[in-house]
């Protein structure tokens, strides 16, 4: 049996301002009508004997992950919440420990949630060959045969071929692993590509749960021990499993490459028999996108004149450009990013600078997704804030009260069930309700269509932490995650 392990904890800072820490790239529809996370799961469905997946993510993204799985009718074996970022080795150790309890030594297929692959048949052929080696006790990684000297990826040097001499129709080629090398400079990358002896390190792996745990026990025992303690101290919370916070925080942070793959003698690399991109930069999105006659990739309301070889993304308003060549322009409701395509790798340093200034634009968009729906700030000034709320059918906000603000709700679409103090009543379209400061209240959507309303807050303090939760269907606590 094959258990997919999906690593969904990345932050995607190189795609700022579209990707933010509370809504990173793996949850976005960047190239087609499904998100990268959904695409990662859907391409696995033709695999024989594939089991429900194990997903690992951080707490802030848990409801996004659950909703995106629900919308494509996938029920996971587990959604594991990591209380701290500890890289891929602890994440995979946790997954292997969980999988070993669910199945009799299954094969794990470990995949980042943010890769873009269009040749599903080639990917599946590679995975099937990976099963062959994994079941024999090898640790398999998928390498990408490079076509350009890329400095943004790590490389793997091929060892001896593992395919029999003169063999045909055995699927994509496989090699023993000679060595892993760090991201090179451009001249070194060119020499790697010219030699034909290197592949890009894709970050995708396949191995039996027992094999991984044995190798980790040999090479990184502190990680395995900490993960066992974190699982023992963990607890179920709705549809999620929370690892023990203290135990997991004590776990060493390391990648599976450093902790195991560079040290093991059981490593195998199989060439991925399909296209691949980690969509890790605006340049990668330009490469993957559909281009017009001037080799531009455009999204949204865009008007261009004398613009070539550029990526222009508009999310909320008209973006017009004249005379650009080889540029990236990305517009969101609260930020605009402009750079030559040759400079887009520097966006990470830009985001680090913005974080050092505590800029909220690095954390969340104007629209923030909640377990009950979404909220979007429309206007804010001294003593008032206007917000648009969308509540999913049958969903409800927490029963709560505020100490520094009052609220006024105006229903735009759908039907609202309002709890205000001791009373409960229905609001229909164009009707409104006033919630005085300090009064217990709750908003619910009893209907079958999304409820949309405008919320006007007024008061001396309008921050998200002015909330006392009295009851919450999603297990959230006071001063956490807004309404």
Image (cartoon, helix red, strand yellow):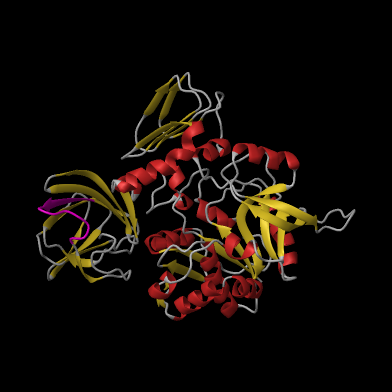
223 in relation to 255, above or below: below
Quadrant assignment for the N terminus: bottom right
| In front of the other: 409 or 362 | 362
Which percent across, then down, holds residue 286?
Answer: 53, 35
Q: Is residue 41 left or right of residue 313?
A: right
Q: Is residue 17 in view from this perspective?
A: no
Question: Furthest residue to the right?
Answer: 166
Q: Which residue shows up at 56% across the image and 76% down it? A: 97
Q: Residue at x 42, y 25 (%)?
A: 303
Q: Is residue 420 magenta?
A: no
Q: Which residues are magenta?
A: 454-466
Residue 122 seen in the current view: yes
Which of the pair 337/256 is nearer the observer? 256
Left or right of 234 in this view: 197: right
Q: Position of residue 124 (x, y in %)?
A: 69, 56
Q: As drawn, is 156 to the left or to the right of 42?
A: right
Foreground: 244 or 127? 244
Residue 431 in the image: x percent, y percent? 17, 52
- The x, y position of residue 450, in whole percent, is 33, 55
């Amino acid at each position: 049996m094959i258990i997919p392990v999906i690593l969904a904890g990345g932050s995607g800072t190189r795609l700022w301002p579209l990707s933010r820490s509370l809504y990173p790239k793996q949850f976005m529809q960047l190239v087609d009508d499904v998100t990268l996370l959904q695409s990662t799961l859907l391409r696995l469905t033709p695999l024989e004997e594939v089991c429900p997946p194990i997903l690992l993510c951080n707490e802030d993204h848990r409801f996004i992950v659950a909703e995106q799985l629900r919308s494509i009718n996938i029920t996971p074996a587990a959604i594991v919440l990591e209380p701290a970022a500890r890289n891929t080795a602890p994440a995979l150790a946790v997954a292997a420990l969980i999988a070993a309890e669910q199945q009799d030594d299954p094969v794990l297929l470990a995949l980042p949630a943010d890769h873009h692959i269009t040749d599903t048949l080639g990917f599946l052929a590679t995975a099937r060959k990976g099963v062959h080696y994994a079941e024999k006790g090898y640790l398999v990684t998928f390498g990408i045969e490079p076509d350009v000297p890329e400095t943004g990826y790590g490389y793997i040097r091929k060892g001896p071929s593992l395919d029999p001499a003169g063999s045909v129709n055995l699927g994509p080629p496989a090699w023993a692993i000679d060595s892993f090398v760090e991201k090179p400079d451009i001249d070194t990358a060119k020499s790697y590509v010219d030699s034909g002896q290197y592949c890009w390190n894709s970050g995708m792996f396949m191995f039996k749960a027992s094999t991984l745990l044995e190798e980790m026990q040999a090479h990184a025992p502190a990680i395995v021990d900490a993960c066992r303690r974190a699982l023992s101290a963990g607890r179920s919370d709705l549809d999620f499993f929370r690892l023990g916070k203290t135990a997991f925080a004590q776990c060493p942070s390391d990648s599976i490459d450093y902790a195991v793959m560079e040290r093991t003698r059981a490593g195998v690399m199989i060439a991925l028999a399909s296209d691949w991109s980690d969509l890790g930069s605006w340049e990668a999105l330009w490469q993957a996108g559909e281009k017009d006659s001037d080799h531009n990739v455009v999204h949204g309301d865009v008007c261009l004149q004398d613009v070539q070889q550029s990526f222009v993304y508009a999310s909320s308003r008209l973006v017009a450009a004249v005379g650009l060549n080889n540029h990236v322009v990305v517009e969101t409701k609260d930020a605009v990013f402009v750079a030559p395509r040759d400079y887009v790798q520097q966006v990470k340093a830009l985001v680090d600078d913005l974080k050092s200034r505590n800029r909220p634009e690095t954390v969340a968009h104007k629209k923030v997704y909640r377990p009950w729906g979404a909220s979007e700030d429309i206007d804010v000034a001294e003593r008032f804030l206007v917000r648009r709320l969308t509540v999913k059918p049958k969903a409800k906000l927490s029963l709560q009260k505020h100490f520094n603000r009052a609220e006024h709700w105006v229903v735009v679409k759908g039907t609202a069930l309002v709890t205000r103090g001791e009373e409960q009543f229905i609001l229909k379209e164009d009707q409104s309700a006033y919630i005085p400061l300090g009064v217990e209240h709750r908003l619910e959507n009893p209907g079958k269509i999304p409820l949309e309303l405008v919320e006007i807050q007024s008061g001396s303090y309008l921050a998200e932490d002015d909330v006392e939760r009295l009851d919450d269907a999603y297990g959230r606590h006071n001063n956490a995650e807004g309404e």
